[in-house]
Image: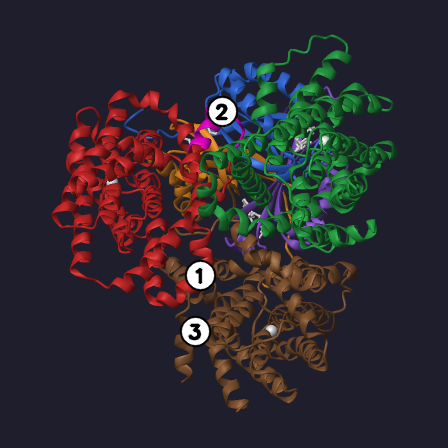
Chain colours: A orange, B blue, C purple, D green, E red, F brown
Amino acid sequence: MHLVKKIEIIANSFELGKILESLDKSGVQGHAVIRNVSGKGLQGGAEDLDMTMLDNVYIIAFCLPEQIKTVVENVRPLLNKFGGTCYVSDVMEIRSVKCVASL
Amino acid sequence: MHLVKKIEIIANSFELGKILESLDKSGVQGHAVIRNVSGKGLQGGAEDLDMTMLDNVYIIAFCLPEQIKTVVENVRPLLNKFGGTCYVSDVMEIRSVKCVASL
Amino acid sequence: MHLVKKIEIIANSFELGKILESLDKSGVQGHAVIRNVSGKGLQGGAEDLDMTMLDNVYIIAFCLPEQIKTVVENVRPLLNKFGGTCYVSDVMEIRSVKCVASL
Amino acid sequence: MDANLIVSNILNPPILFFFLGILAVLVKSDLEIPAPVPKLFSLYLLLAIGFKGGVELIKSGVTQEVVLTLLAAMVMACVVPLYTFFILRIRLDTYDAAAIAATYGSISAVTFITASAFLTELGIDFDGYMVAALALMESPAIIVGLLLVNLFTESEKREFAWSEVLREAFLNSSVFLLVGSLLIGVLTGEHGWQVLEPFTQGMFYGVLTFFLLDMGLVAARRIKDLQKTGFFLITFAILIPIVNAAIGLLIARLIDMPQGNALLFAVLCASASYIAVPAAMRLTVPEANPSLYISTALAVTFPFNIIVGIPLYLYGINLLWR
Amino acid sequence: MDANLIVSNILNPPILFFFLGILAVLVKSDLEIPAPVPKLFSLYLLLAIGFKGGVELIKSGVTQEVVLTLLAAMVMACVVPLYTFFILRIRLDTYDAAAIAATYGSISAVTFITASAFLTELGIDFDGYMVAALALMESPAIIVGLLLVNLFTESEKREFAWSEVLREAFLNSSVFLLVGSLLIGVLTGEHGWQVLEPFTQGMFYGVLTFFLLDMGLVAARRIKDLQKTGFFLITFAILIPIVNAAIGLLIARLIDMPQGNALLFAVLCASASYIAVPAAMRLTVPEANPSLYISTALAVTFPFNIIVGIPLYLYGINLLWR
Amino acid sequence: MDANLIVSNILNPPILFFFLGILAVLVKSDLEIPAPVPKLFSLYLLLAIGFKGGVELIKSGVTQEVVLTLLAAMVMACVVPLYTFFILRIRLDTYDAAAIAATYGSISAVTFITASAFLTELGIDFDGYMVAALALMESPAIIVGLLLVNLFTESEKREFAWSEVLREAFLNSSVFLLVGSLLIGVLTGEHGWQVLEPFTQGMFYGVLTFFLLDMGLVAARRIKDLQKTGFFLITFAILIPIVNAAIGLLIARLIDMPQGNALLFAVLCASASYIAVPAAMRLTVPEANPSLYISTALAVTFPFNIIVGIPLYLYGINLLWR
Ligand SMILES: Nc1ncnc2c1ncn2[C@@H]1O[C@H](COP(=O)(O)O)[C@@H](O)[C@H]1O
Ligand SMILES: Nc1ncnc2c1ncn2[C@@H]1O[C@H](COP(=O)(O)O)[C@@H](O)[C@H]1O
Ligand SMILES: Nc1ncnc2c1ncn2[C@@H]1O[C@H](COP(=O)(O)O)[C@@H](O)[C@H]1O
Ligand code: NA
Ligand code: NA
Ligand code: NA
């Protein structure tokens, strides 16, 4: 077990591509995305996800502690422009090595 | 970056309205809701979400540390009555200011 | 409020049954499962969830700190074989007692 | 001859697909109908029968026959939860007994639909206003169940928000969509029927078939819950539908319902709710154990009714109406 | 006589189900159409009208009439956002004004479809190429809106990625599927029509009905947003459609469109986008408040058009074409 | 003349919508068919062809022709993964080679359905029992692939749970629903067919069209994966289908299949699985790289077969059966 950082981003689904790109650029290759998240933030609630493109995505990415600074620098301008929130916390990773021949 | 609290609530979907209301009353305006969460708790598993209204919701709300006490006071009775679980943890918020003219 | 551990597992959906089983065996009875999670990890991204069975599940389980060791021992071989990631963190539980007659 | 009816009932696509769903779970196939498809199909079925019922109701008009039938429906919806409650109290606590009683006092729309498909199959007529009976019988049991809980538990003054309970009972999505579609059928009549016909009629049987495939999956997944449920409840879940259907048939004979209507009425009495009532009970009687009332209704009574019950009640009609 | 048209419009299943959806929200029923069913239905409707339009376009050919109609469509799509912008600037800042202007310059496919169902109902013909007008009128307003923002805000050099804006305007899923289906209709013609007919035609009315049920739910949920929107915008959302439709009808009269086409054209001018444009605006004018442009389009203009607008514009046609 | 067939194949709505899907990805439109709609449609298609096949099988009965065809199907399902394995071993390791071999030894139901729609189009008959061949050819390759891995890798004693492997092979949702629907078709026969016809037949072509739109999206999204896949595999993914189809056609000629059946048989041999086998491989040969076997099957072989392959194989039949 060793310490990694967990990044949680909640943003409108149309920002997804841009955010993943900027995570990638920051060297954070892995991520998980949950779609169809409804919610309420500064811009008011969103309930009619399907109809009005107001659905959010919840992006989770675990990364090395030293990557956090770059991530924040890259993601913040996006959130500043289009809205959304980003949080960082500490978690322990359970290392696993995939026995995939192709790796 | 500054410290905030993350509240995670997993409860039956029919409680959603009541829980969001009580978050709101506690001064926690923002939240994100993931629907169609299956699971197993004290009341037994739920797999036929669609059919039998047994689906859970996963509610995430980030709030100021000082709001936690009120939230707990307001949400706990609901969970006591109808079931569900609630957890609190520490996270760092990446501040972003949405450049929305209307704010 | 008292301390518990939060386990987060992201893995391919076909592993779900095996993982829940091994959680159960480790004494962790409660869990919540979010389906249709897309993502990118060591094995490359997954976007065509529906079509190609590449969708992930996001499993959350809260457990007692002393159960963690057993969980890790049981879950790691699965992740080693089939892929997936597992993280552990600290959270505070808001105790609630469900007033269910049948308990 | 009864067996004959059962066989001719079973050899229909909807019932066979129901069995296929059960089989899928038993052999551990990974077949599943992804959410929200079952929900979509159940909304479709409610819309379609509601609308059709309305169109036919406006054609037949509100006769004395209609009024008598609807009266009978309401009486049964109030009486069934009452007497089943006392039977259930023999073994269960007040909360569980009330919740299960409410479940059996209410109805299952899919059982009703399957029965009407069976009648169509056999060329037996029935009236559109039976859909109104269906709608009427869905809610009262929820109120009765709650009153029972109030009467028979220690008076810790349950502060029920009655407005909420009533809304849950009469405005839950099933009842609302059914009644709404019925009214729209009444308003648009034959004309509306023609434009919607390829959708509400043409696809009806196919959607029912697909839906019953899912019901088979769901029912079979619940079977393992029955171990916890115990022998008493399983017996209850098979005998009570027969008793309720029998009472229903006697009443139907008394007020001289046509045979098709009588079968549908018996099926309404015999069936148990696994959507509207469980949802209401979780909210209003959270002390009751959901797996008891859902599993019995879903894994025992529902399959029993659509496989054995429907032909059995028709057999009863053949005897009584002779 | 106008009221007569309104009544005959209202007494159709799609409109009645729209009301049912509104009612469900008002009485707080828990009825909801689960995602992604509305999305599926809206893809289906676009595919079906696009395909049908294409098949009919190839039958009629590209005549002068067609060219004139499409020209008129493009002119209106560019002019409407311009003048509405200045009206909106009376009360709103540039961002909100531009976003709302773009919304009203674009169109609502469902309003168009509802109007064409209404025409079919009354036995009034219209041409397949009106679908091409629909497709043409969806995008220009997005570009106009953005140009307005660029012109009228401080020159902090908004570094718009124009390629992204153009893609959003012309290749968003609605426009893309509509135009694609239209072209496929043109390519496969009568032959393709016959094989797809049970799907694209038979179920069309039913899906529209179901979809409008959901639109009722969505529109009603937005009604409470209108308090924040204010009186000015609500008035705007009712009067501007009438003005736009009137201008549209005058142009239609000028170029001598047949009555059916004229109604559809008026409806295109009068309707406001609540899918494509809002999506584009969130990306390109994030400073604008989405609840302003979505709620007015969805909770005021859409219901107004399908309930009162369509018959009203037809009444106007009856006067003008006499 | 071959080109002629290709064109008449391409000018059909399903193929054109497939192209539309590809185009959407290429021009970066945001068109997408939301989950679980594609899943629903694929369940529907399996149910519909299984059921239809069963109904026709009971009409034709089990003749010697049927038995020979099914035997041929089983032989091909076992032989194809064997020899493709050795071809693949030239460049790939055992795990990847076995997984890809299994993929190409199995079949793609949608390719089969597209071919049968093409035949219907051209007025060429084919038999319902070809669906049984389809069902029979889905699973064996999974077992063969696994045996190959066991034989050709270091004996670290892979403790396969064979029961799990067999379940995955023979009871996965595709095979299960297909076979189940076929049996139900056999049981209910003409009678069941009539009641389900508007659902299983009327909408079939439309759903196929919609589904291929999604397949176009999915295939195109996979195209960029092909860079990693390399030239060898891409060539393999185009040549092997042709080889397999050719062998299939020779066998078909030998046992004197009718032309329609021969085409379907060739298509079964030529097509590769992108659902059932990949799912099984992830579980049983996790060492293999999924993007290799999924991308080749989905982004190369599938489009090749439905665009060029089907008319090409028919051209071969025209030559061989002359
Ligand atoms: N660093 C990470 N952060 C978040 N999710 C991840 C990360 N790595 C892997 N995942 C998720 O776990 C799934 C399986 O990972 P893998 O087995 O590495 O392919 C991926 O598809 C992602 O959804
Ligand atoms: N305090 C919060 N806690 C949880 N989720 C939030 C919070 N604030 C915003 N969100 C989520 O982030 C989305 C975008 O936020 P905003 O840009 O502020 O409108 C909202 O729709 C919510 O889903
Ligand atoms: N220990 C746990 N870890 C994760 N989720 C849980 C846990 N306990 C309960 N849940 C979730 O909360 C829901 C309601 O719990 P309960 O009221 O205990 O039945 C369950 O269906 C689970 O989805
Ligand atoms: Na009953
Ligand atoms: Na307009
Ligand atoms: Na093959």
Task: Left or right? Give the position of F227 relative to B74.
Answer: left
Q: Residue at x 55, y 51 (%)?
A: D203
Q: Nearer the viewer, mark 1 or mark 3?
A: 1
Say what secondary structure mark 1 lies in: helix
For the stretch drawn in magenta, the main secondary structure is helix
Q: Residue at x 64, y 23 (%)?
A: D283
Identify the mark at residue F9; answer none if there is no mark: 3
In space, the residues marked 2 and 1 are separated at their CA atoms by: 59 Å
> Horizontal and vertical percent for residue F45?
57, 60
Question: Dot 2: within a 10 Å radius of its alpha carbon, few (fewer than 14), some, or many (20 or more) residues?
Answer: some
Query: Which chain's residue wears label 2?
Result: B
Residue ID for mark 1: E196
Which amino acid type is shown beneath numbered disc 3? Asn
Query: Which chain's residue wears label 1?
Result: E
Magenta segment: E19-31
Whether the magenta-drawn stretch holds residue E27 is answered as: yes
Which amino acid type is shown beneath numbered disc 2? Leu
Identify the mark at residue B3; answer none if there is no mark: 2
